[in-house]
Amino acid sequence: GAVVSQHPSRVICKSGTSVKIECRSLDFQATTMFWYRQFPKKSLMLMATSNEGSKATYEQGVEKDKFLINHASLTLSTLTVTSAHPEDSSFYICSAVIWGQGSSRKTQYFGPGTRLLVL
Amino acid sequence: GENVEQHPSTLSVQEGDSAVIKCTYSDSASNYFPWYKQELGKRPQLIIDIRSNVGEKKDQRIAVTLNKTAKHFSLHITETQPEDSAVYFCAASRSPGEYGNKLVFGAGTILRVKS
């Protein structure tokens, strides 16, 4: 079945440093990937849509200079949290849409998530 | 834009009973409605989805119904088991994968199955 992986699964960093999170589609090509943020006991908040070969589309209120997204290939998107601060601590989850036969076959699958703790 | 409301926020049922979670959406152009199950600290797992060309879909103990006129859809879990305990999210979108389309999630329902 479709698999989306994320790395690292957990990261602790000091305030002011940058952290890169990778999202990979392992057995399919993903022209579109999404990055979400989830606070404890809350729903998934879409941060941005990552499009292969073009700029990411950010949701309102999400700072694009703070959360850098690069979708350099059909199987890899990266999210870099720049100059991280304690309030950036959260669970970050990516997802990818399977490229099926016709839009009726496209489905979104999630990665395992990355738990970021900024001290 | 799309807005998805989900109810109830928490649901406790006795093992073996049925559980029903309901969602409403606002964008009449939405045509894809997945349901995800998320266990603590884990990724959301797609458990069932329905597209707007059908009114009902069933997979073993799980079923989803869709009422396009009323713009609501529901998840039904029969013969609940303790391992069904998790947070369930509904979502809605226009055709997934097409440029600009994105899932909008409900707030989630914490389901507790008591044995």
Image: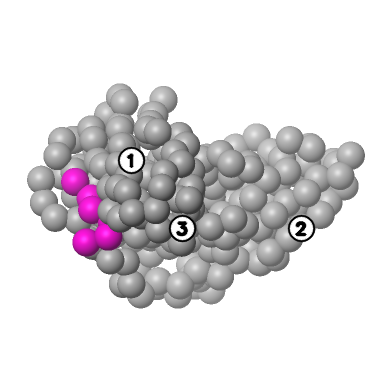
First reached walking from the N terminus: tag 3 or tag 1: 1
The residue at which mark 2 appears reads as B11
Does B77 sit left or right of A96 as displayed? right
Q: Is there any visible trace of residue A6 in the rendered image? A: yes
Q: Is there any visible trace of residue B79 in the rendered image? A: no
The residue at which mark 3 appears reads as A86
Residue B74 position (above or below residue B81): below
Q: Quadrant of residue B94?
A: bottom left
Q: Chain of mark 2?
A: B
Tell me, yes or no, whether the two marked residues, 2 and 3, touch with CB atoms within 8 Å: no
Q: Nearer the viewer, residue B18 or B44?
A: B44
The three-letter code of the residue at mark 2 reads Leu
Q: Position of residue B111 (x, y in %)?
A: 73, 51
Residue A21 position (above or below residue A38): above
Q: Residue at x 41, y 47 (%)?
A: A14
The three-letter code of the residue at mark 3 reads Pro
Label the magenta part by its dominant secondary structure: strand
Q: Nearer the viewer, mark 2 or mark 3?
A: 3
The three-letter code of the residue at mark 1 reads Ile
Q: Which residues are magenta?
A: A65-70
